[in-house]
Image (cartoon, grey):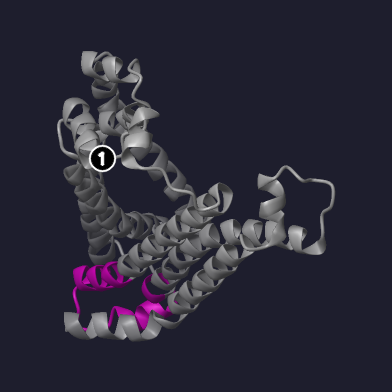
Amino acid sequence: MLGKLIKNEWKATWKFPTLISLFVLIMTILGVLSFKMPFWSKLTSANFESFSFFDLAALAILVMYFVYIVVAVYAVMIYFSIRFYKNMYTDEGYLTHTLPVKPSAHIFSKTLISGTWYLAETILMLGSLFWLLVTFFNTLTGGFELSAAELKAAGLDLSMEAANRVFAEIGGMPLWAFIALMIVITVISSYSSMLIIYLCISIGQLFKKHKVIASLLTYLVVTTVMQIVLTIAIMPVSFSMMLDGDYIAIMESSDIMAGMLAPYAMMSPLFIISLIATIVFSVVSYFVSEYIMRRKLNLD
């Protein structure tokens, strides 16, 4: 039965996030093409005397691009949140809860699909930003390239050995492990975000009136409490690492790239704590939502 729930959830929801993804792709292409307009050559040559319609269009496209990619991720989140509320706690809930399916199966299937789409939109957004930034850099620099030796002489050692050294000395892990950690955090956070929203919706339906408002207020309270708990958890580690001799030595060195990477390397243990906290919050959200749906269901 769980497989059927997942299949039906996918069929019922794939159109909207797919449409959003297509628009993100279109806006990304327009953003990249905007760097081909004359405005950027005028910017690099400091020629600000004549601005044309195309120059304004280039800026307008970029503004629209940044607004849209942020809206796209939240639109997917809001879409699945509304669907969860309607399916589980409105008139549709009477039909949903008559199915011979445990509440845990409903939560799992909806979290799997919504979290996967949220993750897909996040990856699409990051890839889109990376493409745009590479295009922007190439446009401003004219595509010129420097050799590794020239970069190193300028204090920009871009070798993997240098990056691994900084992360190993300060963060206690090589660069590849840090990248893997960030990937894991991104994946788990996508599903955790939806679980936390489902928790707040489930708590909100316990109120007799204004359930939507109650859910929104619950979300504000829950996320605030989570941030406070996470801040308290990472504060001792953060202070101790800021006083670490290796970190101070690298920040005071002439190696520009090492100085740029050092803060991220320093945060490696903090990200591990954040990952653990995210998993704990997710588990709590899942079981509390399941308990409310199983024992405290209120469809009035």
What quarter of the picture does the C terminus occupy?
bottom left
Q: Quadrant of residue 194?
A: bottom left
User: Which residue is at the far right?
Assistant: 49
- Looking at this view, is 248 or 164 the one in front? 164
Query: Quick check: 8 left or right of 197?
Result: left
Query: Quick check: 141 left or right of 292?
Result: right
State yes or no: residue 93 in magenta: yes
State yes or no: residue 221 in magenta: no
Where in the figure is residue 233, as x and y percent of width and height? Answer: 26, 29
| Prevalent SS, magenta region | helix
- Looking at this view, is 149 or 48 the one in front? 149
Residue at point 21% right, 46% down? 181
Where in the figure is residue 146, as x and y percent of width and height? Answer: 41, 43
The reply to whether residue 78 is visible in this rendering is: yes
* Above or below: residue 161 compared with residue 102: above
Residue at point 51% right, 69% down? 24
The reply to whether residue 209 is visible in this rendering is: no
- Residue beneath label 1, please? 159
* Above or below: residue 181 compared with residue 36: above
Where in the figure is residue 294, as x and y percent of width and height? Answer: 23, 66
Tally of numbered discs: 1
Magenta residues? Answer: 87-113
Amino acid bearing label 1: Ser
Q: Residues within 10 Å of mark 1 (few under 14, many from 20)?
A: few
Q: Quadrant of residue 27?
A: bottom right
Query: Quick check: 168 left or right of 52?
Result: left
Where in the figure is residue 1, as x and y percent of width and height? Answer: 16, 84
Element assignment for label 1: loop
